Amino acid sequence: MSNNNSLNQRDPRSLRSHRWFGPDDLRSFGHRSRLKGTGLSDRDYLGKPVIAILNTWSDLNTCHSHLRQRAEEIKRGVWQSGGFPVEVPVLSLGEMLMKPTTMLYRNLLAMETEEVLRCHPVDGAVLMGGCDKTTPALLMGAISMNIPAIYFPAGAMLKARWGKETLGSGSDAWKFWAERCAGNLCDEAWCEIENSIARSAGVCMTMGTASTMMSITEALGMCLPGASSIPAVISEHSRLATDTGRRIVDMVWEDLKPSDVVTQDAMHNAIVTDMAIGGSTNALVHLLAIARRAGLTLSMSDFDSYSRNTPLVANLRPVGKYLMEDFYNAGGLKALLWQIRDLLKLDTLTVNGQSIGNNIEGSEVFDDDVIRSVDNAIADSSGTFVLHGNLAPNGCVIKPAAAEKKFLNHRGPAVVFEDYADLKARINDDDLDVTADSVIVLKSAGPLGAPGFPEWGMLPIPNKLLRAGVRDMVRISDARMSGTSYGTCVLHVSPESHVGGPLAFVQTGDMIELDVEGRRIHLDVSDEELANRRANWKQPEPPYTRGYGQLFAQHVTQAHEGCDFDFLEKNDKVPDPKIF
Ligand code: FES
């Protein structure tokens, strides 16, 4: 399948960059002479597609430490195909070290992506991302800019070992931290885990947010087939880089743009994939934002319909047993998609110019415990459920496969924390009136309240309950949680407490009912009493009163809307700059 717009191909005057370099005028003389000042000659760039390699490498983004080398390998492919590669550093959102949360900056990277592509003589872009927010941010910006673009996934770390244990990033950190808090793990063992759990360059090797978003992006059709499952540090990942560089040059001549690829059918494939892999709850927020950028129709409730009809076939942590390296060895995403092909829109176009059906045709599963068949699924309905009720009028989410089954239908008294500082100060107080049946509630953890919508949602279980053997409880917040997290955590409560959502009015001792199968969450307090509490409520002060934080606070949308900036989510054409 090829794009009809390719009729103009190989005419250098049709290139966007021709406006910078082609004319015989003083301005273009300046553009050309300055490139020559770097040692380039006409043969290097004139009449060739200029490919911007947007690199989210940084010394502070440990997941992307290999991306400098990969950028060189991408350049090799661009040169081979007759393009002119330029590496452009963009904001690197390293999940581990940025505070309060990378989510505060997802829209900043999206905006930077759009503007960097807009203001430069660029004909096509390679989007180098992986660590959680980098992928949606790059996609959002590229979709808005809508010039040919291809995503290059950073790939996952190799799996880690500690003694006889196989360690998965995030998930096993939470698990062994709970054991340490319960007094079951000595300092020496804890240090050994710290030394071994991050084994190589690459993103978290569980099916956390990074691997979820890489997989979803492949299902959207925005990277080469098979790309999302290749581990970060094996030779195939280098070859993928060069293949990606080669392909983007052809995409420019074919004029194959994100709007040709990210269609309603592609979004369908992305959500089915998210459910089948047991993807991170964060995928909802990012896909809502991506859909709005692309002018597609998508709501929170749509995800729940998909969850009811899609079997969970990936046996990967945190909901299953294996890690991303096992997934790759078992056949990777192509093999998984072939298992669920009856649920996909197989004619959907992808960046290699082929349909997704062609790309996955006959892909073999090499380990059917890692990638299950539909008949032997981990669960018949899967992924992320969307709940509604008087506590979350605009919805909230839960990942039931990662929760203890006994809590999926639960009624218990709330133990309320007004914000994270309050939670840190009191959660381990031995006098705290809390039992395993309590429902821990955290407020002021949403997009505006925290601010930035951090991953605090896997709220800690009090140490005294950990010591008593408790490992899960019902927890509710307007925060997100890491894709590597697990437990009965109700997240993304919308509207958030900071703007006066009902969560703001919950008090310790109120009874809360959770009915996951019925998709219902209910605060057992009368409407009259809630109205009374609302009348006496004072909105907390805004956390930021200047700079980017203030811009964020003024324009970010709520969780059920994708948390983009209201002025960026429009699907208007981005104007090219005037060149005088
Ligand atoms: Fe980068 Fe998990 S910290 S992907």
Image (cartoon, rainbow, N blue to C red):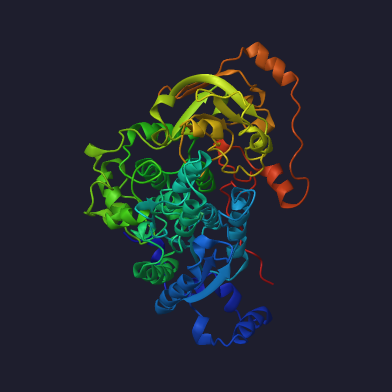
Please determine whether, in this image, residue 408 is positioned above or below residue 292.
Answer: above
Residue at the (49%, 54%) spot, across then down? 188
- Name the quadrant containing residue 434: top right
Residue at the (55%, 30%) spot, across then down? 476
- Name the quadrant containing residue 265: top left
Nearest the viewer among 415 and 189 is: 189
Q: Position of residue 419 (x, y in %)?
A: 67, 35
The quarter in which the N terminus is drawn is bottom left
The quarter in which the C terminus is drawn is bottom right
Q: Position of residue 524 (x, y in %)?
A: 57, 15
Report whether residue 462 is seen: no
Nearest the viewer among 375 and 179 is: 179
Q: Position of residue 165 (x, y in %)?
A: 36, 51
Nearest the viewer among 428 and 250 is: 428
Is 410 left, or right, of 327 in this rendering? Answer: right
Report whether residue 175 is seen: yes
- How many badges with numbers are in the image? 0
Please determine whether, in this image, residue 381 is positioned above or below residue 202.
Answer: above
Please determine whether, in this image, residue 255 is positioned above or below residue 167.
Answer: below
Please determine whether, in this image, residue 564 is positioned above or below residue 412.
Answer: below
Q: Position of residue 112 (x, y in %)?
A: 62, 59
Is 316 left, or right, of 47 in this rendering? Answer: left
